[in-house]
Image (cartoon, rainbow, N blue to C red):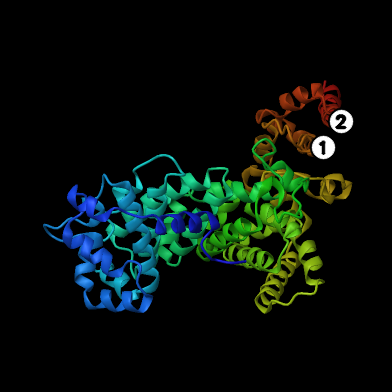
Amino acid sequence: MSLDPPTYLSSLQNNIRARPIPWDGAVRAGTISEDQLSKIRAVDKVRKEQRKEIIEDDLEGYCTLFVGAPGKPSVFESAAKGAHVVQYVLVLLGDLLDGIPALLTAILEHPDPYKPFLPILAQSNDPESPIPLLTSTVLAKLLGGAPDLTDEGSSALRKLFSYLSTLTKTTDGGLQDIAVLQYSGLLRGKKSRQLFWEHRSETVAPLIDILRAAVGIDSANDSASLWSGATVGRTNVEGTLGGGVGLQLLYHALLVLWQLSFEGETVGEGLEDEYDIIPLYTQLLRLSPKEKTTRLLISSLYNLLSTNMQTLLPTAGLARLPALLQNITGRHLTDPDLIEDLQNLSEMLEEYKKTQTTFDEYAAEVNSGHLRWSPPHRSPTFWAENARRILEHDKGELPKKLAEIMSKPWDNDKQVLAISCNDIGNLVREVPEKRYQLERLGLKSRVMELMSEKEESVRWESLNALSGWLRYSFETK
C-alpha cells in the first residue's frame, strides 16, 4: 500500500510539466514581470542539484516570487488571469517544496504564507478544475510542514478541509484518494486533528461513507445491516471491495481515521454515536484483505476503546468483536505491531467481560440503540431476576430508551421491533403493577400499532406483549 501521489494527480502534473508556456508573451501581456520570469527560468527544467543551489542562494527572492512581499505581488496574484501560467507555477512550486526543505521553511516564515493561495483554491466549484486541485496540493505541503498552527494557518486549514471535502463527496475514486492523502499529511498534529473533528460533517462523514460502501452498506441500508452482519462487501479480482471502493482508497481512508483515533478521548463517543464506528470496524475486520488494513483497524479500535472504556467496551461486545479477534489471532500474522495491538485489545476486552453481569450486558445493548436476539431476551430466569431492576435502574432510563428504539420504523431491520415487544411483554408479566409506567411512555399504544405490521415476527411479539396487559386489565376489574 503506497503513499505515492494518486495516478490522477500525477497524470495531471506530468501533462502540465510537458506543456509549452509562451513566457515572453506572458511578460508582454503583463501577466508576469521580467524579474518573475527570470527566477522561474533559472529553476525550470534544470537538474535537481542545480535547482536546489540556485534557490538556497536566493531564498528571499524565491519567497517573494511565490508569496509576495510589501509592494510586490506574488506570481499567483500577478498571473491571476493566466490560467496556464498559474497551473505551471503551482506544479513547479510543488516540486520545489518536495526537494528543497529550506524553501518550505523560508515561505513559512512569511507573515501570511497562505494568502496568495486561498483565492485560487476557491476559484471553481468543479472538483475536477485543475487550479484548485493543484493549489490544495501546495497548501497541504505548507500546512503539513508548519511546526505550529498559527491563526492564519488555522483559517487556511479550515478552508482547505472544506475544499477537500468536495473531493471526498464525489464518486470519483481518483479525486477521493487525492483528498484523503492530503488529509493524512495534514493530521500530524493535535490541533489539526481537533479542527478536523470540529468540521466532521464535512471531513469525517464522507470518509465513513466510503468505508460503509466498502462493506456494502449505503444510505438505504443505514446502520441496521452493520449490527445484523448482513453486509455484502467482498474483495474481487479488480482489487476493490463492495461499492467499488479500491483497496488503496480503503487503506488511505483508514489511515486518516487511525490518525484521528489518537484523539480518542475527544472523538471516541462521537464516532460511535454519530457513525457506528465499532460495528463498522468490526465488519471491515471481517473483510479486511491485507494485514496493513487489519493493523490500522485493530490499532484504531484499541485507541478508541482504551480511552472510552465505560462507553465503548459494551458496544464492542454487542458487535461481537471479541469472537472475531479470536478468529484473527488464529491466523498466521507477520506484522509485529499488529500482533501486539491485537493482543492488547483482546486482553482489554477479556478483562472487561469478567466484570460484566447479564444485566450489565442487557443495559449496554439497550443503550446502544440497537437490539438483537442476545441470550437475555429469551431467558425467563433473566426476566424474573431483573425486570424490576430494569424498570427502576437510573430512574427508569432503560424503559425510556426502549420507547425511543420502538418509535423508529426500522424498515431494514424489523427484528428490532419484535425484540422490543418481547421485552415489553416480559416487563409487564414480571412486574404488572408497574405497567402504567410503560403506558405513560406510550409503549402500550406503540405495541398495539405494531399488531398491524407486515412482518410476522413483529405481529406475533406485539400480540404476546399486549396479552399481558389484557390479562392484568381483566384481573383487576
Q: Which percent across, then down, holds residue 462?
A: 82, 29
Tell me the number on the disc at residue 120. Answer: none
Q: Which percent across, then down, holds residue 166?
A: 47, 44
What amino acid type is highlighted by mark number 1? Asn
**Residue 393 visible in the shown view:** no
Query: Compared with residue 301, is residue 214 higher up or lower down, i.e. above or below?
Result: above
The residue that disc 2 covers is 464
Question: Which of 30 and 446 lies nearest the eye of the viewer?
Answer: 30
Q: Residue at x 77, y 36 (%)?
A: 424
Graded by Cα atoms within 10 Å as few (under 14), some (14 to 19) or many (20 or more), the crowding at tag 2 reads some
SS for dot 1: helix
Q: Quadrant of residue 464?
A: top right
* Quadrant the C terminus occupies: top right
Graded by Cα atoms within 10 Å as few (under 14), some (14 to 19) or many (20 or more), the crowding at tag 1 reads many
Query: Compared with residue 287, is residue 345 higher up or lower down, i.e. above or below?
Result: below
Tell me whether the residue at label 1 lies in contact with that at label 2, contact meaning CB atoms closer than 8 angstroms.
Answer: yes
The residue that disc 1 covers is 422
